[in-house]
Image: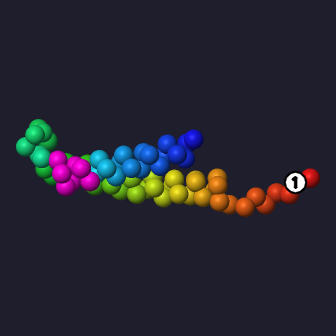
């Protein structure tokens, strides 16, 4: 369950980062454009980090062979 939630959070962070950098109009906010770009970049980098850790977690849970023998 945690791996699936983590995958959805990756999409959320990447989406927020892309939205803040490329789509959001800074005239609608009291924050300046540089602040939005910096926060968007942080969201993108964190989304990439979460994607990597989610990939490792999902790979370990579902695709690694068990080394233990059933007795």
Q: In the structure shown, which secondary structural element does the residue marked by tag 1 occupy?
A: loop
Instruction: Please tell me how crowded label 1 is: few (under 14), some (14-19), or many (20+) other residues with Cα within 10 Å.
Output: few
Q: Residue at x 7, y 43 (%)?
A: 27
Quadrant containing the N terminus in the rendered view: top right
Q: Which residue is mark 1?
A: 70
Segment colored magenta: 18-24
Q: Is residue 27 left or right of residue 66?
A: left
Q: Residue furthest right?
A: 71
The colour mode here is rainbow
How many numbered markers are drawn? 1
Q: Residue at x 60, y 58 (%)?
A: 59
- Image vertical order of residue 13 relative to residue 60, above or below: above
Question: Looking at the picture, how far across and down is residue 31, in whole percent?
Answer: 14, 41
- The prevailing secondary structure element of the residues shown in magenta is helix
Q: Is residue 3 left or right of residue 14?
A: right
Q: Residue at x 35, y 56 (%)?
A: 45
Residue 19 visible to an observer of this rendering: yes
Question: Looking at the picture, how far across and down is residue 58, in whole percent?
Answer: 58, 54
- For the residue pair 23 and 33, the one nearer the viewer reads as 23
- Image vertical order of residue 2 relative to residue 34, above or below: above
Q: Residue at x 48, y 46 (%)?
A: 6
- Image vertical order of residue 16 relative to residue 66, above or below: above
Residue 43 visible to an observer of this rendering: no
Q: Residue furthest left?
A: 27
Question: Looking at the picture, how far across and down is residue 17, in whole percent?
Answer: 28, 51
Residue 4 in the magenta stretch? The answer is no
- For the residue pair 67 and 49, the one nearer the viewer reads as 67
Residue 23 in the magenta stretch? The answer is yes
Question: Looking at the picture, how far across and down is residue 32, in whole percent?
Answer: 12, 46
Q: Is residue 14 left or right of residue 38?
A: right
């Amino acid at each position: 369950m945690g791996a699936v939630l983590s995958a959805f959070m990756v999409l959320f962070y990447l989406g927020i980062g892309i939205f803040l950098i490329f789509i959001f109009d800074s005239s609608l906010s009291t924050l300046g454009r540089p602040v939005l770009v910096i926060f968007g970049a942080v969201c993108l980098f964190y989304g990439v980090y979460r994607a990597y850790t989610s990939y490792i977690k999902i790979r370990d849970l579902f695709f690694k062979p068990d080394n233990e023998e059933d007795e």
